[in-house]
Structure formats: C-alpha cells, structure tokens
Image: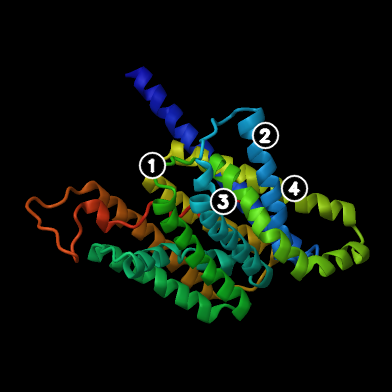
Amino acid sequence: MEEKSALSQGSVFRSLLAIVQWWCFNVTVIIMNKWIFQKLNFKFPLSVSCVHFVCSSIGAFIAIKVLKIKPLIVVDPDDRWKRIFPMSFVFCINIVLGNVSLRYIPVSFMQTIKSFTPATTVVLQWLVWRKYFDWRIWASLVPVVGGILLTSVTELSFNAFGFSAALLGCLATSTKTILAESLLHGYKFDSINTVYYMAPLATMILGVPAMLLEGNGVLEWFHTHETIYSSLFIIFLSGVLAFCLNFSIFYVIHSTTAVTFNVAGNLKVAVAVLISWLIFRNPISAMNAVGCAITLGGCSFYGYVRHLLSQQPAPQGTLWTPKTARSRMELLPLVNDKLDDKV
C-alpha cells in the first residue's frame, strides 16, 4: 500500500511539473512575442515567425540526429510533398496569424479568441466532413461563443485586423488538426518529429514573402534601433523558447489525462491574460473580464462533455445512417484542438 501511495504521489508530482513547465514556456513565448512587437518596436510578424521556424528546425535536428532524444520517424520521400508539405503550409499560416494578431491586439484578447478553436473544429468537421455530433457537444459550445461575442464587443483595444487574424488563426488551427487526421494517417508523429519535418518546409514557404514584405522595414529597424544586440538576443531567445515549448507539450500530454490537460489549458490562458495585464497594463473593462471568464468556463465544460461521451459505449442495436454516428467516438471532435501553440 505504501509503495502504491508513493507511486501515486510521484505520478501527481510529475503531472504538476509537466503542467507548470508547459505553462512557463507557453506564457513566456507569448509575452516575449508581444514584447518584441510593442517594446522593441520590431513590428514584423513574418520575420519573427521565420526566426522561430529556423530555431525550431535546428533544435529538432539536434534533438533527433545529435542527442537522439527521440527516434526519427522515417517518412516516405513521396509523402514529404504529398502529405507533409500541405500540413506545413497550414502549420505556417497558423503560426503567422497568431503572431500577426499579437502585433495588433492585446494578449488577453488574442488568447480569448484562440479559445474559439474547439467551436471552429466542430463546425468545420460538420460542414466539410459531414461528421455528426451529440447535441451535448453543440450545447457545450454555446457559452464559448457567447463569451467570445461579449469579449469582442467590450474590448477597449479592439483592432479589426488583429481580431480577423486571430479568428482566421482559429480556422487554420482547426484545419491543421483535421488535415493531420487524414494526411498523417499511418505516421505516429510526436511533437519533436512534427517540428523536424514541418519547420524547415515552413521556413522555405515563409522566407520569400517575409523578405519581400518586411525586408526593407527590418533593414531600417537595424539602422535606427538603439539597443540592437540586446534586442536581437531577445528575438532569437524567443525562437529557442518556442522550440522548447514543443518538448513541454510532448511531456505534458504523456504525463496527464485528457481532462487534466483540458483544464490546465484553460487555466494557462487565464495565467497568460493575468501576466500580460501586469506587464503591458492594457485596459480591460469589467464586462470584458466577464466575457473572458465565460469563454474559459465554456471551454472547460466542453472538455468535460467530450470526456463523458468518450467514456460511454455506443447504444446496442443502433442502426447507422448518414446522420447518425457508427460509434460513440464519431460523436466527438478531434482530440488535438488544444494543441495550437506549437512553434
């Protein structure tokens, strides 16, 4: 009994450690990116994304090829272009839109909008793949949508371009999640192998647009910025920490249950909102805070409903039709719709 108790305590400690280090990396990367755009006046989200992709490409190569922390998952050469490249393209758009939204709107608003991702995932699966869900899934999304609407209407630092980028980022995240189910079928990618294959392709996809659209601005920033070396250090450090975030995601997924991960993800948003407010002091109205709280509560409720449905067996003798699910799992959205913060 004592041995089992010790093992249980060790498991709880590992889970807490995994969650805390995930929070630290995630919140630090978000805050650093906002600091780069706002305090360093480096207003070039495509270039920041490129730095992150380059650092992640190098980090994944070292982790897999040099340190051999994770074994390399071998991918057929044809699949690199037919299956990995389309994923890399959506992967690239997802990260860029996140950085663009951070450029124009506060962290609190951006993180609240990103909580809309479960709803966009469900709607896309329903519209495009004709996947049908239990009514409780739809009902659980009502507070999420309501909270987002309340937050958007009452946001004191509202910017239409930043809001649109964040909303499109939710769609890109959902598309990435859905495509991964079909394009990466047969490959059991972990987060490090995902970065190993996708980050170099994302760098190639984004490199030319970044140079054409932001090249002159970056050169001007180099010549006019006063603390150039310390600023460059912060920019590249954000890229290194963005790669470390992938390790933390892999660790937390394997150390916690789905319910714990869902709750921890929503609490992580609350932590990011609080820390960003303490640092940047962006104005937040009372109704805006209420809207954010409703959204996070709705996300937790959605995760709870999804967990309950996954534990229930399909009714015996149920006949399948195009509008009913073959199994209980077909009533559920994809499980990775919270993993939108890699790289």
Q: Are marks 1 and 3 in contact (CB under 8 Å)?
A: no
- Tell which circle, 2 or 1, labels the residue nearer the N-terminal end: 2
Residue under the image location 49 percent in, 47 percent down: 79
- Tell which circle, 1 or 4, labels the residue nearer the N-terminal end: 4
Q: Is residue 99 found left or right of 293 in the rendered image?
A: right
What's under tag 4, amino acid-wise? Leu
Which class describes the residues within 10 Å of circle 3: few (<14), some (14-19), or many (20+)?
Answer: many
Q: CA distance from mark 3 to mark 4?
A: 16 Å
Instruction: Write down the residue under mark 1.
Output: 257
Please identify the quarter of the rendering in which residue 60 is found: top right
- Tell which circle, 3 or 4, labels the residue nearer the N-terminal end: 4
In the image, which disc is placed on residue 342? Answer: 3
- Tell which circle, 2 or 3, labels the residue nearer the N-terminal end: 2
| Closer to the eye: label 3 or 4 | 3
The image shows residue 191 at horizontal and vertical percentages of: 53, 43
| Closer to the eye: label 1 or 4 | 4
Instruction: Write down the residue under mark 2.
Output: 62
Instruction: Write down the residue under mark 4.
Output: 237
Q: Nearer the viewer, residue 32 or 296?
A: 32
Let me know if residue 21 appears in the view.
no
Q: CA distance from mark 4 to mark 2?
A: 17 Å
Residue under the image location 15 percent in, 63 percent down: 321
Q: Nearer the viewer, residue 11 or 229?
A: 229
Q: What is the basis of the colouring in this image?
A: rainbow
Q: Are marks 1 and 4 in contact (CB under 8 Å)?
A: no
What's under tag 1, amino acid-wise? Thr
Up the image or down, 251 lies above or below 238; here it is above
Q: Nearer the viewer, residue 103 or 279?
A: 103
